[in-house]
Image: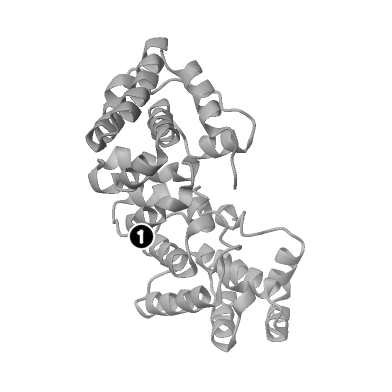
């Protein structure tokens, strides 16, 4: 996902959402941080935005009907968050060599709200791949809103994480029982190692008599080996309708003849997925 004219679009949104003197302060702060080229001025400015935008943070935002607007709306962007990102983008545009490594360290000095903003909108920064290590570091957290900031409705991991990092994020999302339906590009980032990890994790959960989110199986359809086919058989025989459908969807997506043969043994379930009556996108709301 690529966005264009990010700084200009944010400027337009903030002009409409903030009081004129608040937006003027923000622009002056960016200029001051760039002029002084001091790390403390950057971090202080990023924090001070909250005190300046406090009375504006509930303002209604009229998101543009373009990819950027759709992304910001999905992330529930607030004027405060947009102002913080506008500041970071502004100082990077003013002096990238100096500020890029400093911004990469925000994860070490930011409070929870500041960190959530940074992670949610990381992809808006110039040369966003520069901050991959900071994004990966965020996966260590057990604070759900911080983890959601990097994993939910966020195209950054899909675009910049390697398979190991992506797999780590996906498994931890399941472990933390987060909403797997809001992770972007799950099918596109599916890989054989992740399919094995999913099977291993499911077996651990089953051994402990614990359930597995049916959506957890979404990446495995193209990687059904003998062990995963046994997992599909278990899902298809489950008393849980959503688990049955998850198994059917995986078998439908597989090019393995054995998967097709297995699914044929469950004609009613096969018909539901074959007729597009249910999909991964609708599985969670299926009754």
Can the viewer see residue 61?
Answer: no
Toward the viewer: 39 or 158?
39
Relative to 175, say whether 261 is above or below.
below
In the figure, is residue 250 to the left or right of 61?
A: right
Query: Residue at label 1?
Result: 176
Instruction: Identify the residue at horizontal 41%, vertical 40% (top origin).
Output: 96
Identify the image quadrant of residue 249: bottom right
In the figure, is residue 2 to the left or right of 213?
A: right
Residue at the limit of the structure toward the bottom, as seen here: 226
Relative to 118, say whether 15 is above or below.
above
Toward the viewer: 96 or 240?
96
* Residue 186: x %, y % from top left: 56, 61
Instruction: Identify the residue at horizontal 71%, vertical 58% (top origin).
Output: 277
* Residue 67: x %, y % from top left: 62, 38
Instruction: Identify the residue at horizontal 58%, vertical 36% (top origin).
Output: 68
Mark 1 Cα-neighbour bin, 10 Å: few <14, some 14–19, many ≥20:
few
Identify the image quadrant of residue 229: bottom right
* Residue 224: x %, y % from top left: 61, 80
């Amino acid at each position: 996902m690529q966005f264009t004219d990010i700084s200009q679009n944010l400027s337009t949104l903030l002009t409409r959402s903030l009081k004129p003197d608040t937006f003027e302060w923000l622009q002056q702060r960016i200029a001051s941080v760039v002029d002084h080229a001091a790390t403390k001025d950057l971090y202080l400015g990023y924090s001070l935005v909250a005190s300046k935008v406090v009375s504006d943070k509930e303002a209604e935002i009229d998101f543009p009907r373009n990819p950027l607007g759709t992304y910001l709306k999905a992330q529930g962007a607030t004027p405060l968050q947009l102002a913080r990102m506008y500041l970071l983008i502004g100082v990077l545009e003013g002096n990238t060599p100096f500020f890029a490594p400093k911004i990469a360290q925000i994860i070490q000095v930011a409070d929870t709200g500041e960190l959530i903003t940074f992670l949610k909108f990381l992809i808006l920064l110039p040369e966003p791949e520069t901050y991959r290590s900071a994004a990966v570091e965020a996966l260590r957290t057990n604070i759900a809103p911080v983890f959601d900031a990097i994993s939910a409705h966020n195209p950054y991991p899909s675009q910049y994480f390697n398979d190991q990092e992506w797999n780590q994020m996906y498994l931890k999302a399941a472990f933390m029982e987060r909403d797997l339906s809001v992770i972007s590009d799950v099918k596109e980032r599916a890989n054989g190692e992740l399919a094995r990890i999913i099977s291993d994790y499911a077996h651990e959960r089953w051994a402990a008599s614990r359930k597995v989110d049916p959506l957890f199986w979404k990446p495995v359809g193209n990687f059904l080996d003998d062990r995963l086919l046994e997992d599909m058989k278990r899902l298809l025989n489950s008393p849980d309708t959503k688990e049955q459908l998850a198994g059917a969807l995986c078998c439908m997506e597989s090019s393995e003849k054995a998967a097709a043969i297995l699914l044929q043994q469950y004609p009613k379930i096969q018909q539901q997925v074959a007729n597009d009556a249910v999909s991964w996108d609708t599985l969670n709301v299926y009754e």
